Image (cartoon, rainbow, N blue to C red):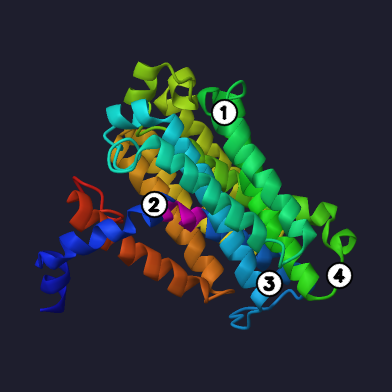
């Protein structure tokens, strides 16, 4: 009865437009952002005390770190939508910008959300603020704006996404060390970067695969993304090798999270490589993010309620606003 009310009652059609500005941030993309941020925290905790799990204590600087990084990431997602209006229309992904929300209004909201994110990052400290600026520079300026426009350059686009993932990871790592009283010099080390590599390989593999469903629109708009330049199967092959390398390196580093998550995700990439179908690409993307999130939640279980709320709020919004069953872990033609 409750499910039927939330699914079918006409009152929801009047409610969901109130969420348009929030969903301009593309909250479903918060999942990989939050996972990488939490991964950085978990890796730092394991480096300090090997066997810490189920950490439920929290502090306000960490909460504000999540809010600030989320808002800055969201502002780059708005910028991406503004610059991708044509290709998103061809890929049937044009929902808000240029349709329900004007480009000019979206630009103002991008500045507003980004500014709030920067202000919020003052609370965790100047190192978090610096990393926030770097995140916007790589994911916003270099990735989306001329003369750089790295998202339309296959290798540079991949590297930019990887560096953005590294920045988010480092934000989590540094925050944990700050909470223990260590300064930036005590937090930054070769170990921070070495432990990050398996996670970055998984992050990069997933980022590469997310460009495959947009292949048709990118070809028509002249965007030289990785699959446009090198082909779908080559993109999947490299992504699969990255996940395999993540497992081997994670195992070598005795990191149970990265090694186990990569190993469990690997069959989905292998199936995608063999069959070379878009539905398998979607499975590999969705399930690999879920798998890593589940393992990270064993260390920081408070990530679960945030993911749960955003997941079901997004399902509610997209169903009543656009008649879409999204997000979902079910892929058509299962």
Q: Are marks 4 and 1 in contact (CB under 8 Å)?
A: no
The dot on residue 145 is 1
Q: Secondary structure at mark 1?
A: loop
Q: Earlier in the sequence, mark 2 or mark 4?
A: 4
Q: Earlier in the sequence, mark 4 or mark 1?
A: 1
**Residue plotted at (29% across, 42% down):** 95
x, y percent for residue 312: 31, 66
On the image, numbered disc 2 is attached to which residue?
Answer: 286
Q: Are marks 3 and 1 in contact (CB under 8 Å)?
A: no
Q: Earlier in the sequence, mark 3 or mark 1?
A: 3
On the image, numbered disc 4 is attached to which residue?
Answer: 182
Q: Are marks 2 and 3 in contact (CB under 8 Å)?
A: no
Foreground residue, 261 or 21? 21
> Between tags 2 and 4, which lies in front?
4
x, y percent for residue 284: 40, 46
**Residue plotted at (63% across, 43% down):** 136
Asked if residue 28 is among those painted magenta in the image, a careful observer would answer yes
On the image, numbered disc 3 is attached to which residue?
Answer: 61
- The span shown in magenta is 27-32
Asked if residue 255 is among those painted magenta in the image, a careful observer would answer no
Q: Is residue 301 something that shows in the picture?
A: yes
Q: Is residue 10 left or right of residue 308?
A: left
């Amino acid at each position: 009865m409750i499910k039927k009310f939330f699914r079918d009652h006409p009152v929801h059609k009047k409610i969901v437009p109130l969420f348009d500005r929030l969903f301009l941030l593309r909250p479903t993309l918060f999942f990989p952002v939050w996972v990488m941020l939490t991964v950085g925290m978990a890796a730092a905790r394991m480096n300090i005390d090997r066997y810490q799990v189920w950490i439920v204590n929290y502090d306000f600087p960490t909460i504000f770190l999540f809010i600030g990084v989320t808002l800055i990431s969201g502002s780059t997602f708005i910028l991406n939508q503004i610059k991708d209006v044509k290709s998103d229309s061809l890929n049937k992904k044009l929902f808000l910008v240029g349709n329900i929300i004007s480009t000019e209004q979206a630009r103002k909201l991008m500045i507003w959300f980004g500014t709030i994110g920067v202000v919020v990052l003052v609370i965790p400290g100047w190192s978090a603020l610096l990393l926030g600026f770097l995140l916007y520079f790589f994911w916003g300026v270099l990735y989306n704006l001329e003369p750089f426009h790295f998202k339309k350059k296959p290798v540079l686009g991949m590297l930019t996404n990887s560096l953005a993932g590294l920045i988010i990871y480092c934000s989590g790592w540094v925050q944990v060390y700050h909470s223990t009283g260590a300064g930036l010099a005590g937090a930054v080390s070769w170990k921070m970067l070495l432990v990050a590599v398996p996670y970055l390989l998984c992050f990069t593999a997933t980022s590469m695969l997310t460009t495959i469903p947009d292949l048709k629109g990118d070809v028509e708009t002249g965007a030289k993304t990785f699959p446009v330049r090198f082909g779908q199967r080559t993109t999947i092959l490299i992504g699969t090798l990255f996940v395999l390398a993540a497992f081997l390196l994670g195992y070598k580093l005795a990191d149970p999270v990265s090694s186990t998550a990569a190993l469990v995700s690997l069959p989905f990439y292998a199936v995608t490589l063999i069959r070379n179908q878009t539905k398998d690409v979607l499975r590999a993307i969705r399930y690999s993010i879920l798998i890593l999130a589940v393992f990270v939640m064993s260390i920081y279980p408070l990530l679960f309620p945030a993911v749960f709320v955003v997941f079901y709020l997004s399902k509610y919004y997209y169903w009543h606003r656009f008649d879409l069953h999204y997000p979902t872990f079910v892929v058509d033609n299962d």
